[in-house]
Amino acid sequence: MAPILQLDSISKRFGAVVVADGLDLSVPQGQALGVIGPNGAGKTSLFGMITGTLPQDGGRVLFRGDDLSGLSPAARCRRGIARSFQVPQPFGGMSVFENLLVAAEFGCADRSGNLGADCADILERCGLADQANRPAGSLTLLQRKRLELARALATQPQLLLLDEVAGGLTEEECHALVGLVRDVKESGVTIVWIEHIVHALVAVVDRLVVLHGGAFIADGDPREVIRRPEVMEIYMGIPADA
């Protein structure tokens, strides 16, 4: 069986800055993959190439074995690829519930069901049911993070890309969000999660990759990867011989 997501020699550069130098990656169905790397390593650009908001210079993005080249971000979303953004981007003047309805109506391929009931269920799962009628712009940071995740789930994704969803949260809020992401994983959704808060990643993901200099320099068990000397030096600033 083909992996749900495959990167085949993906390349991207911005002038002299190389963010992807022939990247290869295979993500099986149902896996939770964590991605770490120093600021500017190209992690968010990687998400852009997967979702179609940023064209790659070379290589292919394959989803369930199909080449996504030429497909718009909207078409990729309807194929089953959803993402959150590092800075939540809700429709601030709309209610929380309306935000989900928009995502479901325009981002979901199968609209034959009861979208309203589906969105209400997602709000309940994401701890936002009591905020359904509030303007999205009035939410706290944690609530906006939850809404960002809820909107992605409203498109009924098979592959969910999370970009720094724990950033800016307190320890207690981070713990709550980790529990929510773990629930999404256990529902069968494949997850690729970029995060600087490593302990949040390790609590959820099955596998961890490290992006640096346009290449994956480590790939494997999360606890083993973060203890590798080269990872500690490049990502955490700890000398390899310490």
Image (cartoon, rainbow, N blue to C red):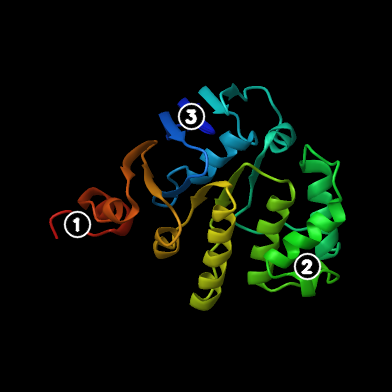
The answer, for residue 167, to whether it is visible in the render is no
Say few, some or many: other residues with alpha carbon within 10 Å of mark 1 (under 14 / 14 to 19 / 20 or more): few
Say few, some or many: other residues with alpha carbon within 10 Å of mark 3 (under 14 / 14 to 19 / 20 or more): many
Question: Disc 3 marks which residue?
Answer: 7
The answer, for residue 113, to whether it is visible in the render is yes
Instruction: Please give left or right for residue 122 compared with residue 33 in the image.
Output: right
Q: Residue furthest left?
A: 241
Question: Disc 1 marks which residue?
Answer: 239
Residue 68 position by quadrant = top right
Closer to the eye: label 1 or 3: 3
Amino acid at dot 3: Leu
Say few, some or many: other residues with alpha carbon within 10 Å of mark 2 (under 14 / 14 to 19 / 20 or more): some
Question: Disc 2 marks which residue?
Answer: 137
Amino acid at dot 2: Gly
- The residues tagged by marks 1 and 3 sit, at their Cα atoms, a distance apart of 31 Å
Q: Position of residue 180 (x, y in %)?
A: 58, 64
- The residues tagged by marks 2 and 3 sit, at their Cα atoms, a distance apart of 36 Å
Instruction: Please give left or right for residue 63 compared with residue 138 in the image.
Output: left
Amino acid at dot 1: Pro
The residue nearer to you, when weighing 64 against 229, is 64
The residue nearer to you, when weighing 40 against 129, is 129
- Determine the residue positioned at 86% across, 62% down: 94
- The residues tagged by marks 1 and 2 sit, at their Cα atoms, a distance apart of 43 Å
Q: Position of residue 187 (x, y in %)?
A: 59, 53
